[in-house]
Structures are given as structure tokens and as C-alpha cells.
Amino acid sequence: MHRWDTAIATGVLTGDRLYRPREYVFALQAQAFHPACAGAQNVIGRNPSIDVDEDLIREFTGAGLFVNVWTENTPERMHALIDAGVTGIFTDYPNRLTNVLAGERT
């Protein structure tokens, strides 16, 4: 799509860890990486807890790509993801994300 119209942004949406994910996204000429970030599909977690793979996020954002994670609903993880440098968060509770972005800590 992006090759037909550069105004259309594309992204790689995944619930699985990818081998060399940045290279995969570049090979598809996508502008964003959309990894799952919660539960069994936690693509960017180093473990099932609140820990976030900041190096992976920096690898993408440092290359000029967006990292928009899905679906995060807990304020604690939202804070951790924002602190790690994600560029977007998909959530079922936009009011919670609004509070987090306003600086509220839970």
C-alpha cells in the first residue's frame, strides 16, 4: 500500500516474537511495529511482569519507526511503556491512558 501511496502508513502487527524484527519491518517497508504487549502475547516483555524490553523499543524508534503496542489496560504497564519510549498505546480504557498521560501515578 505504501508503495502505491506514500501518504498511507503501514505497520507490522504481531502477537509473536519475530527473528530480527527491525529487519523484518524494514523489508516490508513499513513505518511502524505494532507488537502485543500483555499476557501470553507479550512480544516486548522480558518477562511476564511489568518489565519492558527498552532496547527493542529504542532499536525501532532510533531507526525512525513507530512502536505502537496493543492492548494495554493497566496504568502501571502504561507508565512503563511510555517510560520505555513507545509512540502509541492501544487500550480498551482510553480514560486510564488519559490519566496516565496527565501524569497521574497509581
Image: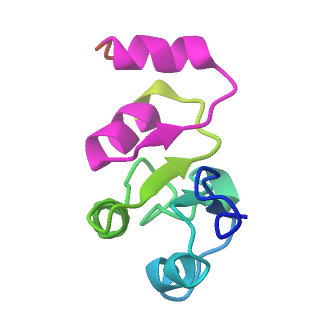
Q: Give the colour scheme of this rendering.
A: rainbow
Magenta stretch, residue numbers? 77-102
Kindly identify the residue that appears in the image at 54 percent across and 88 percent down.
19
Q: Which x, y percent locates residue 17? A: 59, 76
User: How many numbered markers are drawn?
Assistant: 0
x and y, in percent, of residue 81 in the image: 39, 43
The quarter of the image holding the C terminus is top left
Image position of 31 with respect to 106: above or below: below
The spot of residue 85 in percent (x, y) is: 31, 47
Q: Magenta segment, principal secondary structure?
A: helix
Observer able to see residue 47: yes
Please report the residue visible at 33 percent of the width from the left and 11 percent of the height from the top. Answer: 102
Does the magenta run of residues contain 23? no
Query: Residue 67 or 51: which is nearer the viewer?
Result: 67
| Residue 98 belongs to magenta span | yes
- At a point 51% along the width and 61% down the height, the residue shown is 31
6 vs 85: above or below: below
The residue at 48%/62% (across/down) is: 44
* Picture layout, residue 104 above or below residue 34: above
